[in-house]
Image (cartoon, rainbow, N blue to C red):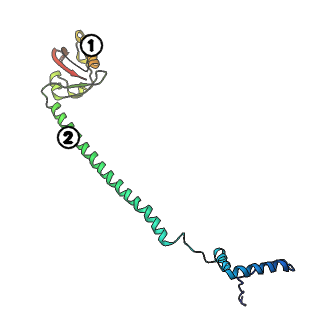
């Protein structure tokens, strides 16, 4: 399609055909605002080129920096804090392992029998000396309780001592116990909760 270009009219208003009074008012008003320069301001405001004053590159960069830089600093500080925390946890864990190994060594190498029982009197841990004293292997002892190791005539006294230990937190006493061979023997008992 080819033809003459459409002519653009900058000052153009429409009114109903024959309404010359309205057209004269428009013309008079246009002349006044054209002379004062107000028309160009109005035209540029409503029909002019969109100025991206709110979207200028400098403004975008400014706000981006204001948000992104503190965010990056926060992420870096968070990363450093987590790294420090992990280091401290690893050090504390290693210290606990070393202390546990030291205590385990003391218990395992103690010449005295060490028996650890739960609140019901069931053995949950014993050392090698406990196996020598009782004649039972470690695995056998871990299936037994304090009551299993006491002869019938010492059962009440032994269980009373265990119950007092649970209440007071410590105690010592000499008690009769049964060796694996069935022989009755005595042991000096020093117990703590």
Q: Secondary structure at mark 2?
A: helix
What is the spatial separation of the Cα atoms under label 2 and label 1, in whole angstroms? 37 Å
Residue in view at x 16 percent, y 29 percent: 128
- Name the N-terminal-most of marks 2 and 1: 2
Q: Is there CB contact under 8 Å for labels 2 and 1?
A: no
Disc tally is 2
Q: Does residue 36 appear left or right of residue 19 in this picture? A: left
Residue lying farthest top? 153
Q: Position of residue 39 (x, y in %)?
A: 68, 78
Q: Residue at x 23, y 18 (%)?
A: 149
User: Up-down: is 88 above or below 190?
Assistant: below
Identify the residue position indicated by label 1 in the image. 160
Q: Residue at x 28, y 21 (%)?
A: 121
Q: What is the x, y in percent for residue 122? A: 28, 23
Q: Secondary structure at mark 1?
A: helix
Q: Is any part of residue 68 visible from this angle?
A: yes
Instruction: Give the quadrant of residue 105.
Output: top left
Q: Identify the residue under disc 2.
A: 98
Please report the residue visible at 48 percent of the width from the left and 68 percent of the height from the top.
60
Label 2 Cα crowd, 10 Å radius (few <14 / some 14-19 / many 20+): few
């Amino acid at each position: 399609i080819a033809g003459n270009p459409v002519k653009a009219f900058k000052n153009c208003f429409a009114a109903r055909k024959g309404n010359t009074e309205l057209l004269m008012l428009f013309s008079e008003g246009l002349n006044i605002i054209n002379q004062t320069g107000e028309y160009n301001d109005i035209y540029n405001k409503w029909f002019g080129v969109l100025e991206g004053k709110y979207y200028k590159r400098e403004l975008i960069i400014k706000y981006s920096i204001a948000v992104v830089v503190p965010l990056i600093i926060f992420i870096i500080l968070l990363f450093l804090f987590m790294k420090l925390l992990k280091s401290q946890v690893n050090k504390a864990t290693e210290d606990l392992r070393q202390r546990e190994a030291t205590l385990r060594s003391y218990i395992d190498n103690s010449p005295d029998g060490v028996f650890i029982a739960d609140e019901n009197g069931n053995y949950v841990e014993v050392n090698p000396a406990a196996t020598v004293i009782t004649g039972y292997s470690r695995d056998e002892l871990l299936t037994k309780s304090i009551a299993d190791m006491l002869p019938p005539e010492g059962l009440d006294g032994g269980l009373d001592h265990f119950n007092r230990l649970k209440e007071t937190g410590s105690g010592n006493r000499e008690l009769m116990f049964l060796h694996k061979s069935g022989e009755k023997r005595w042991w000096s008992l020093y117990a703590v909760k």
